[in-house]
């Protein structure tokens, strides 16, 4: 049962081949047995999962149906879940039990999903390796000595290891797509505003977006259907109709114009990954797509702009964690200043502290215009490049990451080297565009992803291209040894 996709689970439940309760028990046992190798979960919610599974079975017995009714998933541990620890991978929130459900959690629960637990993540979603979590690093099931990517590494590792069929995740600069590439999954970052951020603990509010991680584009379509939609509680949510993503998967790619930016194939790209991307391009050409070289001239400025904007927003968002209202509080503070300093010093890890300081500096008097304002201007140039490109092409294709997953600890002493691994993903967040990563092959036994980008609210187009590609390739069907 653990090898079943979300789509196969939906069919199996509808045909009464097994119940949601039976499936849930199998997966909970599998998590208990195998997750100690991976460290992909922070919290398991066995009692809640079995209650939800029984309720889903009862709903089906009463004639209800639905692709997510009875489907087991997990939530990245920054989606608030009522009465359950929501830690953000941080000591700061280790004792925090959310008093309400995030909109994503409540929408998926209403659709009948079964929550198996909360997955590990980089602390406050700050990282590209899932090594900054207070609960320890997550291991990549394809090679336990390597990182699974971040910040949604727990969700990615759990799905890749067949501990569950799909999971929620978030993407601020590539945190869905990069772990998907590193663990042989399909991961989708929707258009900014497509999925509600209410109840999703913020890292950088103008960049964060929730989305699905699964093994196939079909499963991402099913999970996104349950997550997407307008939310009046979220001021950044956009009131745009949500199409039937599953219904659009089988469209022909004949005549689809795919742009390939020349800037993607510079010196920083592993040549073996470049070869796999070219193979993907050829495969899509056989399906009828037309390939065109394009240019994104301001891509080179995206990383410095992102690493000013994101820390600036983080320094503001994380100022609420002060040891007064909730979260970690230091012992025996001498005065208010001591309370603030020690609570934040003890509660935040090194990467979070680094980004808070960078962000506070960029926003400080005398430096705001030189750094933050200039970064926002570059952000607009990046967006303009995409708007120009999408006048000529329907989809943009390239590598998801410049290199395969690195070894645990390999970049800990050089944070900038880890930041450079986001070079292909952060532009979609700066522009607010939807992006998808899908499996494209292996380098030294480690998975590699190909990235697709589309105009605003064209998630269906991305899912269609990925689904057609997966009908004609088998990379996404490979399973890591031992899982």
Image: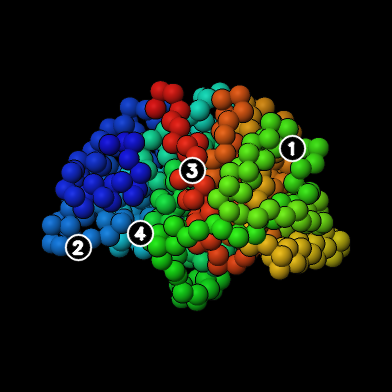
Any mark on residue 472, and which?
3
Local packing at callout 2 (Cα closer than 10 Å; few below 14, some 14-19, many 20+) is few
Q: Nearer the viewer, mark 1 or mark 4?
A: 1
Q: Nearer the viewer, residue 357 or 375?
A: 375
State the count of labels: 4
Mark 3–mark 1 contact, CB under 8 Å? Answer: no
Q: Is residue 47 above or below residue 157?
A: below
Q: Secondary structure at mark 1?
A: loop
352 left or right of 154 in image: right
Q: Quadrant of residue 69?
A: bottom left
- Location of residue 1 in the rendering, given as x and y in whole percent from the top left corner: 27, 36
Any mark on residue 269, and which?
1
- Location of residue 356 in the rendering, given as x and y in whole percent from the top left corner: 68, 51
Q: Nearer the viewer, mark 2 or mark 4?
A: 2
Residue visible at 24% across and 41% down? 23
Q: Nearer the viewer, residue 212 or 96?
A: 212
Q: Secondary structure at mark 3?
A: loop
Any mark on residue 64, and which?
2
Residue visible at 63% across and 62% down? 394
- Location of residue 31 in the rendering, given as x and y in whole percent from the top left corner: 34, 33
Nearer-N-terminus badge (3/4): 4
Q: Which residue is mark 4?
A: 108
Nearer-N-terminus badge (2/3): 2
Nearer-N-terminus badge (1/4): 4
Q: Nearer the viewer, residue 397 or 202?
A: 397
């Amino acid at each position: 049962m653990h090898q079943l996709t979300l789509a196969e689970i939906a069919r199996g439940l509808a045909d009464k081949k097994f119940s949601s309760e039976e499936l849930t028990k199998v997966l909970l046992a599998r998590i208990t047995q195998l997750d100690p190798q991976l460290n992909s979960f922070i919290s398991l919610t066995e009692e809640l999962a079995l209650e939800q599974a029984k309720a889903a079975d009862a709903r089906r017995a009463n004639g209800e149906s639905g692709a997510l009714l009875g489907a087991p998933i997990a939530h990245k541990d920054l989606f608030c879940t009522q009465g359950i620890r929501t830690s953000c991978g941080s000591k700061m929130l280790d004792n925090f039990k959310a008093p309400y459900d995030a909109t994503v959690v409540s929408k998926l629960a209403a659709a009948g999903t079964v929550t198996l637990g909360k997955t590990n993540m980089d602390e406050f979603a700050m990282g590209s390796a899932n090594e900054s979590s207070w609960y320890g690093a997550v291991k990549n099931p394809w090679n336990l000595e390597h990182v699974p990517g971040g910040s949604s590494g727990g969700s990615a590792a759990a799905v890749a290891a067949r501990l569950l069929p799909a999971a929620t995740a978030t993407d601020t600069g590539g945190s869905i797509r990069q772990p998907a590439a590193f663990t042989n999954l399909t991961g989708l970052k929707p258009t900014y505003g497509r999925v509600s951020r209410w109840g999703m603990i913020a890292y950088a509010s103008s960049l964060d977006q929730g989305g699905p991680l699964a093994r196939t584009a079909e499963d991402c379509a099913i999970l996104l259907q349950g997550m997407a939609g307008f939310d009046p509680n979220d001021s950044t949510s956009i009131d745009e109709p949500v199409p039937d993503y599953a219904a659009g998967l089988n469209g022909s790619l004949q005549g689809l114009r795919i742009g390939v930016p020349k800037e993607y194939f510079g010196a920083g790209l592993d040549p073996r990954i470049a070869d796999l991307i070219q193979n993907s391009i050829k495969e899509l050409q056989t399906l009828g797509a037309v390939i065109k070289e394009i240019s994104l001239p301001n891509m080179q400025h995206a990383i410095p702009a992102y690493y000013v904007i994101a820390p600036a927003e983080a320094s503001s968002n994380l100022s609420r964690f002060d040891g007064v209202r909730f979260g970690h509080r230091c012992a025996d503070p001498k005065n208010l200043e001591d309370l603030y300093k020690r609570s934040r010093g003890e509660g935040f890890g090194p990467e979070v502290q680094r980004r808070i300081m960078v962000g506070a500096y960029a926003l400080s008097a005398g430096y705001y215009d030189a750094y933050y304002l200039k970064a926002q201007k570059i952000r607009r140039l990046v967006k303009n490049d995409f708007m120009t490109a999408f006048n000529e092409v329907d989809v943009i294709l390239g590598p998801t990451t410049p290199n395969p997953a690195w070894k645990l600890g390999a970049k800990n002493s050089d944070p900038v080297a880890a930041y450079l691994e986001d070079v292909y993903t952060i532009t979609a967040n700066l522009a607010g565009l939807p992006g998808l990563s899908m499996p494209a092959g292996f380098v030294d036994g480690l998975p590699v992803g190909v990235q697709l980008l589309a105009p605003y609210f064209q998630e269906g187009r991305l899912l269609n291209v990925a689904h057609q590609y997966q009908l004609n390739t088998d990379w996404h069907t490979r399973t890591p040894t031992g899982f």
